[in-house]
Amino acid sequence: MFRYLFSLIFVCAVVQVQAADIRIAAATNLRYVLPALAEEFEQQTGYQLAVSYAASGTLTTQIQHGAPFEVFLSANPDYVQRLIKAEFTEGKVVEYAQAQLALFAANHSLLDVDDSLLSLKTALEQGKLNKVAIANPKYAPYGQAARSELEKAGIWQQIQPHLLIAENASQVVQFSLSTSVDAGFVPYAHIIQPQLASLGRFVKLDVTLPQQAVLVRGASEYADQFLKFVQTERARMIFIKHGFLVD
């Protein structure tokens, strides 16, 4: 009888831990702010987050193929809408912040950085441009934003041979530190981190990316609590501290 009760208590404890482990699919631009949010949320509720980072388009595909996520934090509303239309979500969509894009050049680069991309265009025309890193525009919102900026500058087609395509926005930062890369289009939230800001120079570009969150179909009540938490004043202050804009 004692062994039975012990086993029952053990099973219940395991179930409680698993229930409080909220599975999050997060765009890579949240890599620095989400740990701070998770720490605050855990202090308030006792619930922990299990986070998987990838490009928003990649996460969308994973969810459509049955990945066991409960909350999707996307860097582009289009991917949230794709899941809604396919009936993979539940509840209301939450737009919790606006992300920002920056052009970064590591200390080894001779390229000046300016918000009009004039120095990039000049280096291209003079044949002095090596590589420029961007996230894959096919499924990474930061890559799509970078492409838009390059199109606006009138050099998208000409710069194609010089592009180094990364899987996601975080990988762009890594690529940008390579000696063969002159610059990279990176998340502003990444490059303001002290350990990265000292490695080069950057300029914030005049473009924002709406950040949306939604519950994945079948999400637990704990997941819903986290979605409510990201809308609180405390969460808003954390987002601002990490380079996001909030209304």
Image (spheres, rainbow, N blue to C red):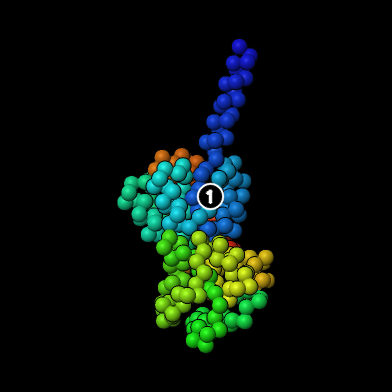
| Residue 166 rendering spot, x and y as whole percentages | 51, 64
Q: Residue at x 44, y 80 (%)?
A: 158
Q: Residue at x 35, y 54 (%)?
A: 82
Q: Residue at x 39, y 56 (%)?
A: 79
What's the amino acid at mark 1? Ser
Residue 9 visible here: yes
Quarter of the image for the N terminus: give it.
Answer: top right
Image height of 17 relative to 85, above or below: above
Q: Which residue is mark 1?
A: 52
Image height of 11 relative to 44, above or below: above
Q: Quadrant of residue 5?
A: top right
- Seen from the viewer's position, the closer of residues 32 and 167 is 167
| Residue 12 rendering spot, x and y as whole percentages | 56, 27
Residue 243 visible here: no
| Residue 42 rendering spot, x and y as whole percentages | 59, 45
**Relative to residue 170, is residue 77 drawn left or right?**
left
- Seen from the viewer's position, the closer of residues 93 and 194 is 194
